[in-house]
Amino acid sequence: MGSKFRAAFSGLLFALRTQSNMAVHLSAAVAALALAYYLEVRDWEWVALVLTITLVLAAEMFNTAVEAVVNLYSPQYHPLARVAKDVAAGAVLVTALGAVIVGMLIFLPKLL
């Protein structure tokens, strides 16, 4: 495996080990995939779920990267550092809310 892949996996493992929200998102993803399997969702629904899960996990990792860079550049409090961190966290929130909506659109009709 090349050094680029090792670095990428290292970043993924760092996020999994250090970010509690990453574990929450991953647990929700596993639950959603298990439910999708149980409910025998259609192919396009699988695509929507996988893309949504990927988006949320990637957003969480970008948020982690932004926080690390901001902490490196500005170890003391700065209003713009707070803005960068808040906006990155907001992006995660937007993707997570979108994932909830996608899940509701796919699962609610099958469960009701």
Image (cartoon, helix red, strand yellow):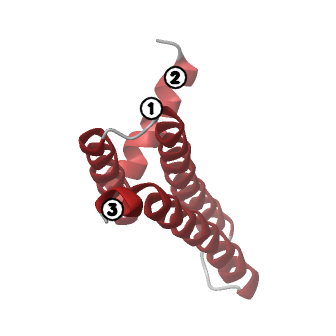
Residue drawn where x is 44% and y is 37% of the image = 42
Query: Residue 68 occupies which quadrant of the picture?
Result: bottom right
Amino acid type, residue under disc 2 in the picture: Phe
Note whether 97 is above or below 17 in the view shown.
below
Which x, y percent locates residue 101? 52, 66
**Crowd around label 3: few <14 · some 14–19 · many ≥20 (10 Å):** few
Looking at the picture, tell me which residue is in the foreground, 94 or 32. 32
Which x, y percent locates residue 84? 70, 73
Amino acid type, residue under disc 3 in the picture: Val
Q: Marks 2 and 1: CB-CB under 8 Å?
A: yes
Q: Which mark is residue 5?
A: 2
Q: Which one is closest to the eye, mark 3 or mark 1?
A: 3
Q: Which mark is residue 9?
A: 1
Note whether 53 is above or below 93 in the view shown.
above
Q: Please, what secondary structure does the residue beneath circle 1 have? A: helix
Which x, y percent locates residue 106? 45, 54
Note whether 16 is above or below 102 in the view shown.
above
